[in-house]
Amino acid sequence: MTSLLVPDKAGKLGDIVLGFDNVSGYQSPEYQKSGPYFGALIGRYGNRIAKGQFTLEGKTYTLAKNNGPNHLHGGLKGFDKVIWQAEPGSSAAGQTLKLTYQSKDGEEGYPGNLTVTVVYTLTQDDALQIDYSATTDKATPVNLTNHSYFNLSAGQRPDVLAHQVTLPADRYTVVDADLIPTGELRAVKGTAFDFTTAHAIGERIAQVPGGYDHNWVLNAATEGQHPAATVYEPTSGRTMQVSTTEPGVQFYTGNFLDGSLTGKGGRVYGKHAGFCLETQHFPDSPNQPKFPSTTLQPGQTLRSTTTYQFGVRK
């Protein structure tokens, strides 16, 4: 996702996602080194897998360690770095783009030939809906997400610290120093992780070493779509409501952006220039039997939907 134009309270369109003016930006050495995954479709497994390995049905699989001692976002050549078949179209809901990819058995160390279809729909009622589906011929872990960085001020503010965020989650997954879950689901109440009521991103971020980069356990994680986040940007009046079929959401505040990348319109992307809301199953689920399973079996079809609904407060 390279651009997303949304009107502010005055009706003026603005581009609310971080990225580059042309494809060369996504291929530059600076971008490859920094690796922020701007706008990317993430797989085969979004987020981290501890020590780059997991055991499934009695067999241990080894993956690339591309994030310190751990595996991140599908490996050295994850779904963000492959060529997808693209097919524009339309549906009753709105204009669509259908992306299809076949991930071969053994690709990046994962088992099974995995066929993935992702449909982006720009709906008539100002929402972006992303529908994921996948099938496999061998049991394999799958965790698909979108890694867009949002700044609802559309570049009017250099960071997102004034954005007000609500996350309908009473618990989050506690992580160790390498951002791997310990297995504990801790209550957010009385902590800087409590976004059950709206708080500015910058209000308590100093209390979180390194900034927010954690998975929240969504309260209403039942069948069908349920609320995952609400964001309001006071300057522009823009709002974004996120709903999903997934049990969790990774709220990330652009902590690793360091000013080394110059994006659209010559804007330098410094720390906290954008935030991500990556709807997902929990990090390291293949190694955490108490977490909701990410294993897809032959004969099953993975289906997942996330919707970003846009509006304004005047």
Image (cartoon, rainbow, N blue to C red):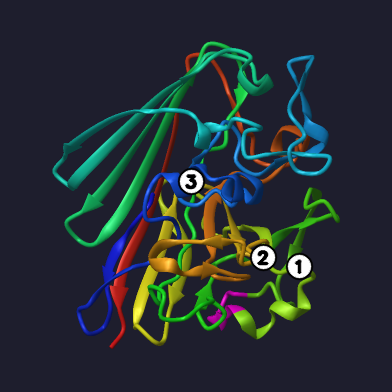
Whether residue 191 can be seen here: yes
Query: Which x, y percent locates residue 192?
Result: 71, 77
Examine the rendered structure and indicate whether residue 285 appears above or below residue 312. Answer: above
Residue 78: image quadrant is top right
- Span shown in magenta: 195-201
Disc 2 and disc 1: Cα gap in Å? 7 Å
> Label 3 is placed on what type of residue?
Tyr
Say which label, 2 or 3, has the lower sequence index. Answer: 3
Examine the rendered structure and indicate whether residue 262 appears above or below residue 103. Answer: below
For the residues labelled 2 and 3, say whether their Cβ atoms are less than 8 Å apart: no
The image shows a total of numbered marks equal to: 3
Work out which quarter of the rendered image holds the C terminus and state it.
bottom left
Whether residue 17 can be seen here: no
- Which residue is disc 1 drawn over? 210
Query: Which x, y percent locates residue 224?
Result: 40, 47
Q: Which residue is found at the position 31% from the left and 54% from the top?
A: 128
Say which label, 1 or 3, has the lower sequence index. Answer: 3
Disc 1 and disc 3: Cα gap in Å? 25 Å
- Which residue is disc 3 drawn over? 26
Q: Which mark is residue 255?
A: 2
Residue 15 or 227: which is nearer the viewer? 15
Residue 17: image quadrant is bottom left
Examine the rendered structure and indicate whether residue 303 appears above or below residue 248. Answer: above
Residue 130 or 99: which is nearer the viewer? 99
> Label 2 is placed on what type of residue?
Asn
For the residues labelled 2 and 1, say whether their Cβ atoms are less than 8 Å apart: yes
> Label 1 is placed on what type of residue?
Gly
Say which label, 2 or 1, has the lower sequence index. Answer: 1
Category of crowding for the residue at label 2, using alpha-carbon neighbours closer than 10 angstroms: few (below 14), some (14–19), many (at least 20): some
